[in-house]
Amino acid sequence: MENQKSSSSLKAVIAVLAVLLVGSLIYIFKVTSDVKTVQTELKSTMTEKESVMTDLQELKATYDAAISENTSMSDELIQERDKVVSLMADLSKSKGDVSSMAKYKKQFFALQNNMKALMAENEGLKKENKMVTSQRDSTVVVLGESQKYNETLVGQNEELSKTVEKAAKLTILNTSGTAFKVRSSGKQVETDKASRADMLKISFTIAANQIAKSGEKAYYVQVIDSKNNVLGDKKTVNFGDQTLTYSFITNVNYENKTVQVTENLPGKDFPKGVYYVNVFDNNENVSKTSFTLK
């Protein structure tokens, strides 16, 4: 009878232990499963944190590239880039739990949308600037070509003016000096003897010129004897800082046709030697010649 009681007690103990063992196994399994779940969640959130950080780095790189182009939107781009940098700093310090990651992802998407809008606007400005630059360059080219053309025209006009001015000047030809002996009858006899001469005849021709200005013309005639003396009136006239001593002035009414000019220069005791004749238009020597008296 006692053996039956002992057997029954043993069975009861075994049954209790079996229940406890099963309970322990169930508990251990549940704890292990929870730990794996937590580990999986932690691994997932850490991976998600790295992913968001990578996305933020790419966002920052996009802003850096756009800012380096130095467009009119650079200030706005810098402000948005700084927001990205600030969010990266916060994310780096975070524990990476689910709730915080949800917040960071939301902020990232907001920044990403802002970036897309700003990039689109920046691209539009770049295209407009490129177009304006192209138009400006074209304008500069056109203006440069116009300036060159104008400079060419100015140069041609200046050359033409010089040519016309040069062509409009009167040409003095056939300048000559001859000595004469005037007889009591008034007859003039040419001579090359200094002792016989009592008058010098100076002649020159003004050539015809249709583009020259017509009207009264004055020429200063200078006759210098062999002793370097100016004959005749010996008057002086100033042209700026230049002074001219002349023998006489001859005035001509020029009408664009050939004009023969002859003037007499009376005198006595003409020395032997070479005589020089200079014809001046103001201070410009326009013709010269020489002759000799024996």
Image (spheres, rainbow, N blue to C red):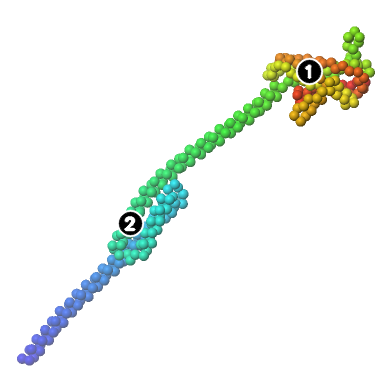
Where is residue 149 shown, x and y percent of the image? 58, 31
Q: Which mark is residue 250?
A: 1
Mark 1 vs mark 2, foreground winner is 1
Comparing 167 with 182, the one in front is: 182
Left or right, 125 with reference to 16: right
Which residue is most to the right? 195
Q: Which residue is drawn at the image coordinates 77% and 20% (left, top)?
A: 219
Q: How crowded is mark 2: few (under 14 residues within 10 Å), some or many (20 or more)?
A: some
Which residue is most to the bottom? 2
**Mark 1 belongs to which amino acid?**
Thr
Q: Which residue is drawn at the image coordinates 53% and 37% (left, top)?
A: 140
Left or right, 177 with reference to 77: right
**Mark 2 belongs to which amino acid?**
Gln
Which residue is most to the left? 1
Where is residue 237 shown, x and y percent of the image? 78, 25
The local secondary structure at tag 1 comes to: strand
Left or right, 166 with reference to 25: right
Left or right, 66 with reference to 247: left
Q: In this view, does 33 lie above or below 285?
A: below
Comparing 42 with 284, the one in front is: 284
Q: Which mark is residue 107?
A: 2
Comparing 35 with 158, the one in front is: 158
Comparing 204 with 97, the one in front is: 204
Give the spatial CA distance, label 1 vs label 2. Answer: 104 Å
Q: Is residue 198 above or below residue 118?
A: above
Where is residue 98 shown, x and y percent of the image? 29, 63
The quarter of the image holding the C terminus is top right
- Residue 87 in which image quadrant: bottom left
